[in-house]
Amino acid sequence: MPAVPSVDWEPRPFLIERYSPPAMRAVWSDQHKFELWLRIEVLACEAWAALGRIPESALPKIRKGTFDATKIAEVESRVGHDVIAFLTVLNESIGQPEARYVHLGMTSQDLNDTTMAVQMVESARLIIRDLGAVREAAAEVAIRHRRTLMAGRTHGVVAEPITFGFKVAGWVAELDRSIARLERAAEEAGVGRVSGAVGTHATIDPSVEEHVCRELGLKVDVVSTQVVARDRHAGYMSALAIAAGTLERIATEIRHLQRSEISEAFEPFGKEQKGSSAMPHKRNPVLTERVCGLARVVRGHLLTALENTALWHERDISHSSAERVIFPDACAVIDYMAIEMNKVLRGLEVRPERMLANLQFAGGVVFSQRVLLALVDSGIAREDAYLVVQRAAMQAMEDPGAGFRALLEKNEDVMKRIGSKMDQVFDPWAGLEHTDLAYERLGLAVTTK
Protein backbone atom coordinates (compact mmCIF):
# COMPACT_ATOMS: atom_id res chain seq x y z
CA MET A 1 0.00 0.00 0.00
CA PRO A 2 1.22 3.54 -0.70
CA ALA A 3 2.38 5.52 2.31
CA VAL A 4 -0.16 7.87 3.84
CA PRO A 5 0.88 11.44 2.99
CA SER A 6 1.89 13.58 5.93
CA VAL A 7 -0.68 16.11 7.11
CA ASP A 8 0.13 19.78 6.77
CA TRP A 9 -1.10 21.41 9.98
CA GLU A 10 -0.58 24.99 8.83
CA PRO A 11 -3.99 26.70 9.05
CA ARG A 12 -5.37 27.63 5.63
CA PRO A 13 -8.80 29.22 6.10
CA PHE A 14 -8.90 30.80 2.64
CA LEU A 15 -9.50 29.07 -0.65
CA ILE A 16 -7.20 31.41 -2.58
CA GLU A 17 -4.75 33.60 -0.69
CA ARG A 18 -4.19 35.73 -3.81
CA TYR A 19 -7.45 37.51 -3.08
CA SER A 20 -6.98 37.65 0.69
CA PRO A 21 -5.43 40.85 2.10
CA PRO A 22 -3.02 40.06 4.99
CA ALA A 23 -5.02 42.00 7.60
CA MET A 24 -8.14 40.02 6.75
CA ARG A 25 -6.24 36.74 6.76
CA ALA A 26 -5.13 37.56 10.29
CA VAL A 27 -8.72 38.15 11.43
CA TRP A 28 -9.87 34.73 10.23
CA SER A 29 -6.71 32.77 11.05
CA ASP A 30 -6.83 29.82 13.42
CA GLN A 31 -4.31 31.63 15.61
CA HIS A 32 -6.68 34.57 16.13
CA LYS A 33 -9.65 32.28 16.62
CA PHE A 34 -7.83 30.43 19.40
CA GLU A 35 -6.76 33.74 20.94
CA LEU A 36 -10.40 34.78 21.12
CA TRP A 37 -11.44 31.40 22.53
CA LEU A 38 -8.83 31.80 25.25
CA ARG A 39 -9.98 35.32 26.03
CA ILE A 40 -13.60 34.18 26.32
CA GLU A 41 -12.61 31.36 28.67
CA VAL A 42 -10.60 33.72 30.88
CA LEU A 43 -13.39 36.33 30.92
CA ALA A 44 -15.92 33.67 31.89
CA CYS A 45 -13.69 32.48 34.73
CA GLU A 46 -13.32 36.06 35.95
CA ALA A 47 -17.09 36.43 36.02
CA TRP A 48 -17.49 33.11 37.83
CA ALA A 49 -14.91 34.20 40.40
CA ALA A 50 -16.81 37.44 40.99
CA LEU A 51 -19.89 35.33 41.73
CA GLY A 52 -17.91 33.12 44.13
CA ARG A 53 -18.45 30.04 41.97
CA ILE A 54 -14.71 29.47 41.53
CA PRO A 55 -11.84 30.65 43.75
CA GLU A 56 -10.12 33.95 42.92
CA SER A 57 -6.84 32.14 43.54
CA ALA A 58 -7.37 30.10 40.37
CA LEU A 59 -7.36 33.13 38.08
CA PRO A 60 -3.59 33.81 37.87
CA LYS A 61 -2.86 30.36 36.42
CA ILE A 62 -5.91 30.47 34.14
CA ARG A 63 -4.84 33.86 32.80
CA LYS A 64 -1.40 32.43 32.00
CA GLY A 65 -2.91 29.61 29.94
CA THR A 66 -1.38 29.10 26.51
CA PHE A 67 -2.03 27.05 23.40
CA ASP A 68 -0.18 25.78 20.37
CA ALA A 69 -2.20 25.80 17.14
CA THR A 70 -0.23 22.93 15.63
CA LYS A 71 -0.76 20.79 18.70
CA ILE A 72 -4.49 21.60 18.72
CA ALA A 73 -4.77 20.45 15.11
CA GLU A 74 -2.94 17.23 15.99
CA VAL A 75 -5.28 16.52 18.91
CA GLU A 76 -8.33 17.36 16.78
CA SER A 77 -7.27 14.74 14.23
CA ARG A 78 -7.66 12.15 17.02
CA VAL A 79 -10.71 13.39 18.92
CA GLY A 80 -12.64 14.84 15.98
CA HIS A 81 -13.70 18.00 17.85
CA ASP A 82 -11.91 21.33 17.60
CA VAL A 83 -13.12 22.85 20.89
CA ILE A 84 -12.27 19.71 22.88
CA ALA A 85 -8.83 19.71 21.24
CA PHE A 86 -8.35 23.36 22.20
CA LEU A 87 -9.42 22.73 25.80
CA THR A 88 -7.15 19.70 26.05
CA VAL A 89 -4.10 21.72 25.03
CA LEU A 90 -5.11 24.76 27.08
CA ASN A 91 -5.77 22.76 30.24
CA GLU A 92 -2.40 21.05 29.95
CA SER A 93 -0.76 24.47 30.07
CA ILE A 94 -2.81 25.53 33.12
CA GLY A 95 -2.62 22.34 35.12
CA GLN A 96 -4.87 21.01 37.88
CA PRO A 97 -6.83 21.89 39.91
CA GLU A 98 -7.25 25.26 38.18
CA ALA A 99 -7.95 23.78 34.73
CA ARG A 100 -11.18 22.19 35.96
CA TYR A 101 -12.78 25.64 36.20
CA VAL A 102 -12.23 26.38 32.50
CA HIS A 103 -15.29 26.07 30.25
CA LEU A 104 -17.51 25.73 33.33
CA GLY A 105 -21.15 25.33 32.27
CA MET A 106 -20.31 26.31 28.71
CA THR A 107 -20.86 24.63 25.36
CA SER A 108 -18.77 24.78 22.21
CA GLN A 109 -21.00 27.30 20.51
CA ASP A 110 -20.45 29.75 23.35
CA LEU A 111 -16.94 29.98 21.97
CA ASN A 112 -17.72 29.61 18.27
CA ASP A 113 -20.58 32.08 17.89
CA THR A 114 -19.12 34.72 20.17
CA THR A 115 -15.76 34.50 18.44
CA MET A 116 -17.35 34.66 15.02
CA ALA A 117 -19.23 37.80 16.04
CA VAL A 118 -15.95 39.45 16.98
CA GLN A 119 -14.39 38.38 13.67
CA MET A 120 -17.34 39.73 11.71
CA VAL A 121 -17.13 43.08 13.48
CA GLU A 122 -13.36 43.23 12.97
CA SER A 123 -13.78 42.32 9.30
CA ALA A 124 -16.46 44.96 8.80
CA ARG A 125 -14.12 47.55 10.29
CA LEU A 126 -11.44 46.69 7.71
CA ILE A 127 -13.90 46.57 4.81
CA ILE A 128 -15.54 49.86 5.79
CA ARG A 129 -12.11 51.48 5.99
CA ASP A 130 -11.22 50.28 2.49
CA LEU A 131 -14.63 51.10 1.02
CA GLY A 132 -14.16 54.55 2.53
CA ALA A 133 -10.91 54.89 0.61
CA VAL A 134 -12.76 54.00 -2.61
CA ARG A 135 -15.42 56.58 -1.74
CA GLU A 136 -12.74 59.23 -1.18
CA ALA A 137 -11.06 58.39 -4.49
CA ALA A 138 -14.40 58.53 -6.31
CA ALA A 139 -15.23 61.88 -4.71
CA GLU A 140 -11.94 63.31 -5.93
CA VAL A 141 -12.66 62.12 -9.48
CA ALA A 142 -16.18 63.55 -9.31
CA ILE A 143 -14.91 66.96 -8.23
CA ARG A 144 -12.05 66.99 -10.72
CA HIS A 145 -14.34 66.17 -13.64
CA ARG A 146 -17.37 68.18 -12.60
CA ARG A 147 -17.12 70.12 -15.89
CA THR A 148 -15.94 67.30 -18.15
CA LEU A 149 -18.64 66.88 -20.78
CA MET A 150 -19.54 63.47 -22.10
CA ALA A 151 -22.46 61.60 -23.62
CA GLY A 152 -24.80 59.91 -21.21
CA ARG A 153 -25.84 56.47 -22.41
CA THR A 154 -28.92 54.33 -21.92
CA HIS A 155 -29.17 50.77 -23.26
CA GLY A 156 -25.58 51.25 -24.46
CA VAL A 157 -26.74 53.98 -26.87
CA VAL A 158 -25.78 57.65 -26.61
CA ALA A 159 -28.61 59.54 -24.90
CA GLU A 160 -28.07 63.13 -23.69
CA PRO A 161 -25.14 65.20 -22.39
CA ILE A 162 -23.90 64.70 -18.83
CA THR A 163 -20.55 65.29 -17.17
CA PHE A 164 -18.18 62.57 -16.12
CA GLY A 165 -18.16 64.03 -12.64
CA PHE A 166 -21.91 63.70 -12.40
CA LYS A 167 -21.64 60.03 -13.35
CA VAL A 168 -19.01 59.43 -10.67
CA ALA A 169 -21.09 61.33 -8.09
CA GLY A 170 -23.60 58.51 -8.45
CA TRP A 171 -20.86 56.06 -7.48
CA VAL A 172 -20.08 58.13 -4.39
CA ALA A 173 -23.73 58.04 -3.29
CA GLU A 174 -23.93 54.28 -3.76
CA LEU A 175 -20.70 53.72 -1.85
CA ASP A 176 -22.14 55.78 1.01
CA ARG A 177 -25.15 53.47 1.12
CA SER A 178 -23.02 50.34 1.01
CA ILE A 179 -20.87 51.58 3.89
CA ALA A 180 -23.89 52.53 5.98
CA ARG A 181 -25.56 49.19 5.21
CA LEU A 182 -22.49 47.23 6.30
CA GLU A 183 -22.23 49.28 9.49
CA ARG A 184 -25.82 48.36 10.35
CA ALA A 185 -25.26 44.70 9.45
CA ALA A 186 -22.13 44.50 11.60
CA GLU A 187 -24.00 46.00 14.54
CA GLU A 188 -26.78 43.44 14.11
CA ALA A 189 -24.32 40.55 13.81
CA GLY A 190 -22.14 41.80 16.67
CA VAL A 191 -23.85 39.76 19.39
CA GLY A 192 -22.42 37.07 21.62
CA ARG A 193 -23.95 34.25 23.61
CA VAL A 194 -22.59 32.40 26.64
CA SER A 195 -25.75 30.63 27.72
CA GLY A 196 -24.84 26.94 27.67
CA ALA A 197 -26.51 24.03 25.92
CA VAL A 198 -29.80 25.04 24.21
CA GLY A 199 -29.36 28.61 25.50
CA THR A 200 -31.37 28.44 28.73
CA HIS A 201 -28.56 29.52 31.10
CA ALA A 202 -29.27 26.34 33.06
CA THR A 203 -25.57 25.84 33.77
CA ILE A 204 -24.19 29.35 33.44
CA ASP A 205 -25.22 32.57 35.13
CA PRO A 206 -26.46 35.33 32.78
CA SER A 207 -24.02 37.75 34.41
CA VAL A 208 -21.16 35.64 33.02
CA GLU A 209 -22.55 36.12 29.52
CA GLU A 210 -22.97 39.85 30.10
CA HIS A 211 -19.39 40.23 31.35
CA VAL A 212 -17.88 38.31 28.43
CA CYS A 213 -19.84 40.20 25.78
CA ARG A 214 -19.25 43.59 27.37
CA GLU A 215 -15.48 43.05 27.51
CA LEU A 216 -15.45 41.91 23.87
CA GLY A 217 -17.43 44.93 22.73
CA LEU A 218 -20.47 42.84 21.77
CA LYS A 219 -24.12 43.01 22.66
CA VAL A 220 -25.76 40.00 24.30
CA ASP A 221 -28.06 38.11 21.95
CA VAL A 222 -31.61 38.77 23.14
CA VAL A 223 -32.68 35.15 22.73
CA SER A 224 -30.42 32.38 21.49
CA THR A 225 -30.75 28.64 21.41
CA GLN A 226 -27.46 26.79 21.34
CA VAL A 227 -26.59 29.05 18.41
CA VAL A 228 -27.13 32.66 17.48
CA ALA A 229 -29.90 32.68 14.86
CA ARG A 230 -28.35 32.81 11.40
CA ASP A 231 -30.60 35.53 10.02
CA ARG A 232 -28.03 37.91 11.52
CA HIS A 233 -25.28 36.26 9.51
CA ALA A 234 -27.37 36.23 6.35
CA GLY A 235 -28.01 39.96 6.76
CA TYR A 236 -24.29 40.56 7.12
CA MET A 237 -23.53 38.52 4.01
CA SER A 238 -26.26 40.39 2.15
CA ALA A 239 -24.55 43.68 2.99
CA LEU A 240 -21.27 42.25 1.67
CA ALA A 241 -22.96 41.07 -1.53
CA ILE A 242 -24.57 44.46 -2.15
CA ALA A 243 -21.25 46.22 -1.52
CA ALA A 244 -19.66 43.83 -4.02
CA GLY A 245 -22.40 44.80 -6.47
CA THR A 246 -21.58 48.47 -5.95
CA LEU A 247 -17.93 47.86 -6.77
CA GLU A 248 -18.96 45.72 -9.72
CA ARG A 249 -21.18 48.49 -11.06
CA ILE A 250 -18.25 50.94 -11.01
CA ALA A 251 -15.91 48.36 -12.53
CA THR A 252 -18.40 47.49 -15.27
CA GLU A 253 -18.78 51.15 -16.23
CA ILE A 254 -15.03 51.62 -16.48
CA ARG A 255 -14.75 48.47 -18.59
CA HIS A 256 -17.33 49.87 -21.00
CA LEU A 257 -15.63 53.26 -21.17
CA GLN A 258 -12.32 51.51 -21.93
CA ARG A 259 -13.70 49.68 -24.97
CA SER A 260 -11.71 50.50 -28.11
CA GLU A 261 -14.59 52.22 -29.89
CA ILE A 262 -15.30 54.42 -26.83
CA SER A 263 -11.85 54.97 -25.23
CA GLU A 264 -13.02 57.56 -22.71
CA ALA A 265 -11.53 56.22 -19.47
CA PHE A 266 -8.86 53.61 -18.74
CA GLU A 267 -7.80 51.77 -15.63
CA PRO A 268 -4.09 52.20 -14.80
CA PHE A 269 -1.58 50.25 -16.88
CA GLY A 270 1.99 49.75 -15.65
CA LYS A 271 5.02 50.68 -17.73
CA GLU A 272 6.10 47.05 -17.96
CA GLN A 273 2.60 45.58 -17.98
CA LYS A 274 1.55 43.28 -20.83
CA GLY A 275 -2.05 42.83 -21.93
CA SER A 276 -1.80 39.72 -24.06
CA SER A 277 0.74 37.00 -24.75
CA ALA A 278 -0.27 37.07 -28.42
CA MET A 279 -1.37 40.65 -29.23
CA PRO A 280 1.04 43.40 -28.13
CA HIS A 281 -1.52 46.17 -28.70
CA LYS A 282 -3.85 44.91 -25.96
CA ARG A 283 -4.55 47.05 -22.92
CA ASN A 284 -7.12 44.88 -21.22
CA PRO A 285 -9.14 46.09 -18.19
CA VAL A 286 -7.93 43.20 -16.05
CA LEU A 287 -8.36 44.92 -12.67
CA THR A 288 -11.99 45.83 -13.21
CA GLU A 289 -12.71 42.46 -14.83
CA ARG A 290 -11.30 40.79 -11.74
CA VAL A 291 -13.58 42.87 -9.53
CA CYS A 292 -16.60 41.85 -11.61
CA GLY A 293 -15.68 38.18 -11.40
CA LEU A 294 -15.18 38.24 -7.64
CA ALA A 295 -18.54 39.96 -7.11
CA ARG A 296 -20.13 36.78 -8.42
CA VAL A 297 -18.32 34.78 -5.75
CA VAL A 298 -19.72 36.95 -2.96
CA ARG A 299 -23.25 36.73 -4.38
CA GLY A 300 -22.89 32.96 -4.48
CA HIS A 301 -21.89 32.93 -0.82
CA LEU A 302 -25.03 34.91 0.01
CA LEU A 303 -27.16 32.01 -1.20
CA THR A 304 -25.33 29.67 1.19
CA ALA A 305 -25.77 32.14 4.08
CA LEU A 306 -29.50 32.27 3.38
CA GLU A 307 -29.67 28.48 3.30
CA ASN A 308 -27.96 28.41 6.73
CA THR A 309 -30.81 30.20 8.49
CA ALA A 310 -33.05 27.13 8.86
CA LEU A 311 -31.46 24.80 11.41
CA TRP A 312 -32.95 21.79 13.22
CA HIS A 313 -34.52 22.51 16.61
CA GLU A 314 -32.09 24.26 18.97
CA ARG A 315 -29.10 23.59 16.75
CA ASP A 316 -27.39 21.44 14.20
CA ILE A 317 -24.04 21.94 12.50
CA SER A 318 -25.12 21.99 8.86
CA HIS A 319 -24.25 25.70 8.83
CA SER A 320 -20.84 25.30 10.44
CA SER A 321 -18.86 23.71 7.62
CA ALA A 322 -20.23 26.17 5.08
CA GLU A 323 -19.54 29.18 7.28
CA ARG A 324 -15.90 28.20 7.68
CA VAL A 325 -15.62 28.74 3.93
CA ILE A 326 -18.00 31.52 3.01
CA PHE A 327 -17.33 34.13 5.72
CA PRO A 328 -13.52 34.21 5.59
CA ASP A 329 -13.66 34.13 1.79
CA ALA A 330 -16.41 36.71 1.34
CA CYS A 331 -14.81 39.14 3.79
CA ALA A 332 -11.43 38.71 2.14
CA VAL A 333 -12.80 39.01 -1.39
CA ILE A 334 -14.82 42.17 -0.78
CA ASP A 335 -11.87 43.79 0.99
CA TYR A 336 -9.59 42.83 -1.89
CA MET A 337 -12.10 44.27 -4.36
CA ALA A 338 -12.19 47.56 -2.45
CA ILE A 339 -8.40 47.77 -2.41
CA GLU A 340 -8.27 47.09 -6.16
CA MET A 341 -10.97 49.66 -6.97
CA ASN A 342 -9.13 52.27 -4.92
CA LYS A 343 -6.07 51.63 -7.13
CA VAL A 344 -8.20 51.89 -10.25
CA LEU A 345 -9.81 55.19 -9.31
CA ARG A 346 -6.56 56.70 -8.03
CA GLY A 347 -4.88 55.87 -11.32
CA LEU A 348 -7.86 56.32 -13.65
CA GLU A 349 -6.87 57.81 -17.00
CA VAL A 350 -9.71 60.05 -18.22
CA ARG A 351 -9.72 61.36 -21.80
CA PRO A 352 -11.96 64.47 -21.96
CA GLU A 353 -11.21 65.09 -25.63
CA ARG A 354 -12.48 61.63 -26.52
CA MET A 355 -15.58 62.18 -24.41
CA LEU A 356 -16.24 65.44 -26.25
CA ALA A 357 -15.77 63.75 -29.63
CA ASN A 358 -18.20 60.96 -28.70
CA LEU A 359 -20.67 63.58 -27.50
CA GLN A 360 -20.84 64.78 -31.09
CA PHE A 361 -21.50 61.27 -32.41
CA ALA A 362 -23.34 61.35 -35.76
CA GLY A 363 -23.35 65.12 -35.76
CA GLY A 364 -24.99 65.55 -32.37
CA VAL A 365 -27.88 63.08 -32.15
CA VAL A 366 -27.65 63.45 -28.37
CA PHE A 367 -29.51 66.75 -28.85
CA SER A 368 -32.53 65.12 -30.51
CA GLN A 369 -34.86 65.74 -27.57
CA ARG A 370 -33.78 69.38 -27.49
CA VAL A 371 -34.68 69.70 -31.17
CA LEU A 372 -37.98 67.89 -30.60
CA LEU A 373 -39.00 70.24 -27.78
CA ALA A 374 -37.98 73.32 -29.75
CA LEU A 375 -40.17 72.21 -32.67
CA VAL A 376 -43.09 71.48 -30.34
CA ASP A 377 -42.69 74.94 -28.81
CA SER A 378 -42.81 76.39 -32.32
CA GLY A 379 -46.31 74.97 -32.79
CA ILE A 380 -45.79 71.60 -34.53
CA ALA A 381 -47.72 68.61 -33.19
CA ARG A 382 -45.44 66.36 -31.13
CA GLU A 383 -46.04 63.33 -33.37
CA ASP A 384 -45.12 65.28 -36.50
CA ALA A 385 -42.05 66.81 -34.86
CA TYR A 386 -40.94 63.41 -33.59
CA LEU A 387 -41.01 61.96 -37.13
CA VAL A 388 -38.96 64.83 -38.53
CA VAL A 389 -36.30 64.54 -35.82
CA GLN A 390 -36.22 60.74 -35.86
CA ARG A 391 -35.80 60.64 -39.63
CA ALA A 392 -32.81 62.97 -39.49
CA ALA A 393 -31.26 61.15 -36.52
CA MET A 394 -31.56 57.71 -38.13
CA GLN A 395 -30.06 58.97 -41.38
CA ALA A 396 -27.18 60.57 -39.49
CA MET A 397 -26.40 57.35 -37.60
CA GLU A 398 -26.51 55.27 -40.78
CA ASP A 399 -24.34 57.78 -42.63
CA PRO A 400 -21.95 59.42 -40.13
CA GLY A 401 -20.79 61.86 -42.79
CA ALA A 402 -24.26 63.35 -43.11
CA GLY A 403 -24.37 64.90 -39.65
CA PHE A 404 -27.56 65.29 -37.60
CA ARG A 405 -27.41 69.07 -37.33
CA ALA A 406 -26.42 69.43 -40.97
CA LEU A 407 -29.45 67.40 -42.05
CA LEU A 408 -31.77 69.53 -39.93
CA GLU A 409 -30.28 72.70 -41.39
CA LYS A 410 -31.18 71.44 -44.86
CA ASN A 411 -34.83 71.20 -43.81
CA GLU A 412 -36.41 74.57 -44.66
CA ASP A 413 -39.39 74.11 -42.31
CA VAL A 414 -37.11 73.25 -39.39
CA MET A 415 -34.87 76.24 -40.05
CA LYS A 416 -37.85 78.51 -40.44
CA ARG A 417 -39.13 77.50 -37.02
CA ILE A 418 -35.99 77.09 -34.92
CA GLY A 419 -33.08 78.22 -37.09
CA SER A 420 -32.34 81.21 -34.88
CA LYS A 421 -32.21 78.94 -31.83
CA MET A 422 -30.02 76.22 -33.35
CA ASP A 423 -26.86 77.15 -31.39
CA GLN A 424 -28.86 77.20 -28.17
CA VAL A 425 -30.49 73.86 -28.96
CA PHE A 426 -27.08 72.26 -29.61
CA ASP A 427 -25.38 73.84 -26.58
CA PRO A 428 -24.18 70.86 -24.46
CA TRP A 429 -24.32 72.89 -21.24
CA ALA A 430 -27.97 73.83 -21.67
CA GLY A 431 -29.90 71.62 -19.27
CA LEU A 432 -26.95 70.80 -17.02
CA GLU A 433 -27.58 73.71 -14.67
CA HIS A 434 -28.79 71.46 -11.88
CA THR A 435 -25.98 68.89 -11.82
CA ASP A 436 -24.31 70.78 -8.97
CA LEU A 437 -27.28 69.78 -6.83
CA ALA A 438 -25.86 66.23 -6.67
CA TYR A 439 -22.60 67.60 -5.26
CA GLU A 440 -24.43 69.70 -2.68
CA ARG A 441 -26.48 66.71 -1.53
CA LEU A 442 -23.32 64.61 -1.19
CA GLY A 443 -21.48 67.33 0.67
CA LEU A 444 -18.80 67.55 -2.01
CA ALA A 445 -16.99 70.84 -2.58
CA VAL A 446 -18.16 72.58 -5.76
CA THR A 447 -15.62 74.87 -7.41
CA THR A 448 -16.61 77.85 -9.53
CA LYS A 449 -14.46 76.73 -12.47
Image: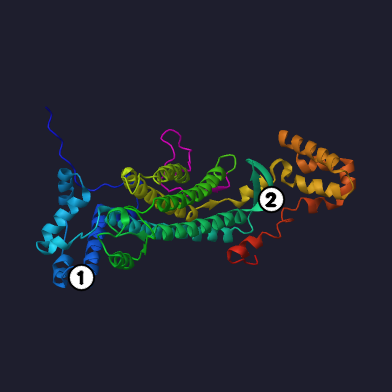
Q: Nearer the viewer, residue 85 or 289?
A: 85
Percent coordinates x, y for residue 249 in the rendering: 53, 47
The residue type indicated by label 2 comes to Pro
Q: Residue 154 lies in what quarter of the image?
A: top right
Dot 1 or dot 2, earlier in sequence = 1
Q: Nearer the viewer, residue 166 or 105?
A: 105
Relative height, residue 208 to residue 282 (above, below): below
Q: Total label count?
A: 2
Relative height, residue 126 to residue 7 (above, below): below
Q: Is residue 69 left or right of residue 308?
A: left
Percent coordinates x, y for residue 144 in the rendering: 57, 60
Q: Nearer the viewer, residue 14 or 144?
A: 14
Percent coordinates x, y for residue 235 in the rendering: 45, 52
Magenta segment, prevailing SS (helix, strand or loop): loop
- Say which quadrant the C terminus sits in: bottom right
Q: Which residue position holds label 2? A: 161
Q: Secondary structure at mark 2?
A: strand
Q: Is residue 270 magenta?
A: yes
Q: Whole-Å distance between the Cαs marked 1 and 2? A: 71 Å
Relative height, residue 223 to residue 288 (above, below): below
Which circle marks residue 404 in the picture? Answer: none
Q: Which residue position holds label 1? A: 49
Residue range in magenta is 263-286
Query: Is disc 2 surrounded by few (<14), some (14 to 19) or many (20+) residues within 10 Å?
Result: many
Percent coordinates x, y for residue 436 in the rendering: 65, 62
The residue type indicated by label 1 comes to Ala
